Amino acid sequence: MVSNLWEYGPQARPGAGAGLDLVGFDVEATDGKIGSVDEETTEVGSAHVVVDTGFWIFGKHVVLPAGTIRRIDPQERKVYVALTKDQIKDAPEYDKDKHRGDAAYRTELGEYYRGQNIAI
């Protein structure tokens, strides 16, 4: 189980990634590619990526908390997450107006991902 959903684990981003920008990296679910990183924040206590799922889920964007990320491969430009495509597809949709300052929205996201029993 992920200890802190909104922080990168040391296995995902050793040394905090030293300035590595994930925008544009492909996102790999446990069962294949799901999209690409559209936005990222490494803000303490709310680190996450916003993933554009592209055609796979008809252009849906989702927030993936940093704690769902298993590892990052800078050479392949890939982010590997501990979620299936269906878990990402069923996640609450990204709301650009709420995602940074709305506590209820963040709680909704946290409850969804905590309910997925993510093991990293």
Image (cartoon, rainbow, N blue to C red):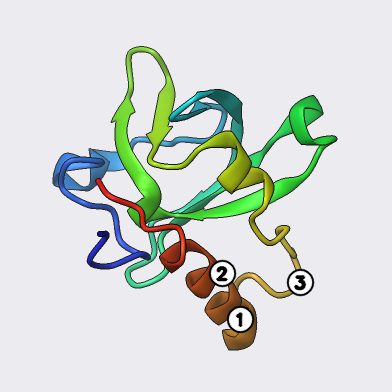
Give coordinates of residue 97: x percent, y percent. Answer: 76, 71
Q: Is residue 91 above or below residue 79?
A: below
Q: Is residue 37 left or right of residue 21?
A: right
Residue at 43%, 30% in the rendered image: 30
Dot 1: within a 10 Å radius of its alpha carbon, few (fewer than 14), some, or many (20 or more) residues? few
Real-space CA distance between mark 2 and mark 1, rounded to the nearest whole angstrom: 13 Å
Dot 3 alpha-carbon crowd within 10 angstroms: few under 14, some 14 to 19, many 20 or more: few
Q: Residue at x 81, y 26 (%)?
A: 55
**Vertically, is 5 above or below 86?**
below
Q: Residue at x 48, y 62 (%)?
A: 113
Q: What is the C-alpha distance between the residues marked 3 and 1?
A: 8 Å
Q: Residue furthest bottom?
A: 103
Label 2 close to label 1 by CB (< 8 Å): no
Q: Going by the image, does 53 lie left or right of 119? A: right
Question: Dot 2: few (<14), some (14–19), or many (≥20) neighbours within 10 Å?
Answer: many
**Residue for badge 2:** 109
- The local secondary structure at tag 1 comes to loop
Give x and y (percent) for residue 60. Answer: 78, 44
Measured in 3D between alpha carbons, the distance from the residue under mark 2 to the one under mark 3, in whole angstroms, is 14 Å
Q: Quadrant of the N terminus?
A: bottom left
117 relative to 108, above or below = above
Kindly state the secondary structure of the residue where label 2 is placed: helix
Q: Amino acid at mark 3?
A: Asp
* Image-based side of 93 in relation to 78, left or right: right
The residue pinned by badge 3 equals 97
Residue under circle 1? 101
Q: Amino acid at mark 2?
A: Leu
Q: Nearer the viewer, residue 80 or 82?
A: 82
Mark sitting earlier along the chain (2/1): 1
Which of the two residues, 110 or 21, is positioned nearer the viewer here?
110
Q: From the image, state whether disc 2 or disc 3 is nearer to you.
A: 2
